[in-house]
Amino acid sequence: MATLTDVKRPPRQTERATKKRPRTSGKDLNGAARFRPAWMPLLWLLAPIGVVAAFYLYPFLNIIFLSFTDASPLSGNGDFVGLENYQFLANDPVFWNAVLNSVVYAICVVPLMVALPLLLAVLLKDHIPGIGFFRSLFYIPAISSLVVVSLAWTAILKDNGTLNTTLMDLQLISEPLPFLTGRWFLLFSAMAVTLWQGLPYYMVLYLAALSNVDRSLYEAAAVDGAGPIRRFFTVTVPGVRIMMSLVGILTMIGSIKIFTEVHLLSNGSGGIGGESQTLTMYIRSVGLDPTYGSLGQGAAGSVFLFLLTLGLLLMSQRLNRKAEEQ
């Protein structure tokens, strides 16, 4: 009679579980895939590569080439002149004035655009009745046309506009302030338009980042006696640091190549004598003027704008890396 020790236990893994699946070969494919060459999927990349090459790579290389020529805006052809265009920019005070305006614009706008949307997102992140309506209301400037926004602000900031009229009625000023004609007044007015329209867009990005911050961190900080301000700097800011870096990069790129706000507020003049024109406005006036313009000089200005933007981005990335290490 068989005992319990004589009964063989079943294996832990069945034959089906231990059997390895064979590697898929070309014979196992179905339909037309059996006769498709291995390089055929590479053809799917031709369309996007062609678009990038035609609309990004070729214009970029062409601008670099034109910066070494004396091409005119009308013909687009010219002779090789070496570094003459860059020497002209280096000795042109109008060019350096435009560079200064663009750099000041970025220095003022970037910190405010990083901080103010975050504060607004913190105020609107709680789910309370009616909060969706206020979020939609705050987002209206972001979906409005920049041309319409600039024209509306022009009506507010002109000499007989709403702002100057209100300040004079309150006897805070004796004469209208030159919001649209003074050099720095015009630049700061354009900054206000940029901030007013950009705040809602970056607020939405911060709301998405805040939703990923662990709520238990706020509860632990509150138990330790941290107040709202301390919780903001010890929990909220570290939790959205990556989004803050992204917002800073996007804002810096947009601020350095700012054009529309200053152009529309100044009616295309860039202020009295062009004192408030930015680098992109200078490139447009020099490179596209059919009478006195030089396409080569405008292309050289574009190359300088690219290098300036790249340098500022690398510097910001280095500062962010040092801040994370600390």
Image (tube, helix red, strand yellow):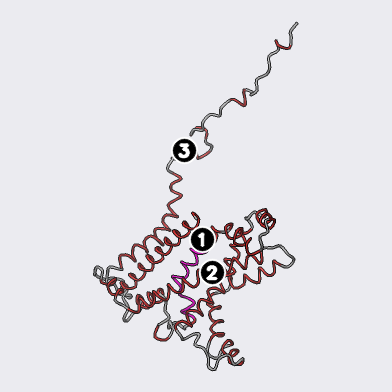
What residue lies at 32% left-to-right and 81% top-to-bottom? 291
Foreground of the two, 150 or 115: 115
Residue 137 against residue 29 in the figure, above or below: below
Secondary element under disc 3, as helix, strand or loop, is helix
Q: Residue beneath label 3, please?
A: 35
Q: Quadrant of the N terminus?
A: top right
Task: Please say whether residue 256 is one of the residues in the magenta stretch.
Answer: yes
Q: Quadrant of residue 11?
A: top right
What residue lies at 50% left-to-right and 69% top-to-bottom? 110
The disc placed on residue 113 is 2
Label 2 and label 3: CA atoms lie apart by 56 Å
Please report contact status of discs 2 and 3: CB closer than 8 Å, yes or no.
Answer: no
The disc placed on residue 274 is none
Q: Residue beneath label 1, please?
A: 245
Tag 1: residue type?
A: Ser
Label 2 and label 1: CA atoms lie apart by 11 Å
Please report contact status of discs 2 and 1: CB closer than 8 Å, yes or no.
Answer: no
Please tell me which of labels 2 and 3 falls first in the chain: 3
- Nearer the observer: mark 3 or 1; the answer is 1
Tag 2: residue type?
A: Met
Task: Tell me where residue 34 appears, x and y as whole percent.
Answer: 49, 37
In the figure, is residue 66 to the left or right of 15? left
Mark 1 packing: few (<14 Cα in 10 Å), some, or many (20+)? some
Please tell me which of labels 2 and 1 falls first in the chain: 2
Residue 122 against residue 104 in the figure, above or below: above
Task: Tell me where residue 56 appears, x and y as whole percent.
Answer: 40, 61
Chain part drawn in magenta: 246-264
Mark 2 packing: few (<14 Cα in 10 Å), some, or many (20+)? many
Task: Tell me where residue 324 appears, x and y as whole percent.
Answer: 50, 55
In the figure, is residue 32 to the left or right of 60? right
Secondary element under disc 2, as helix, strand or loop, is helix
What residue lies at 69% left-to-right and 66% top-to-bottom? 132
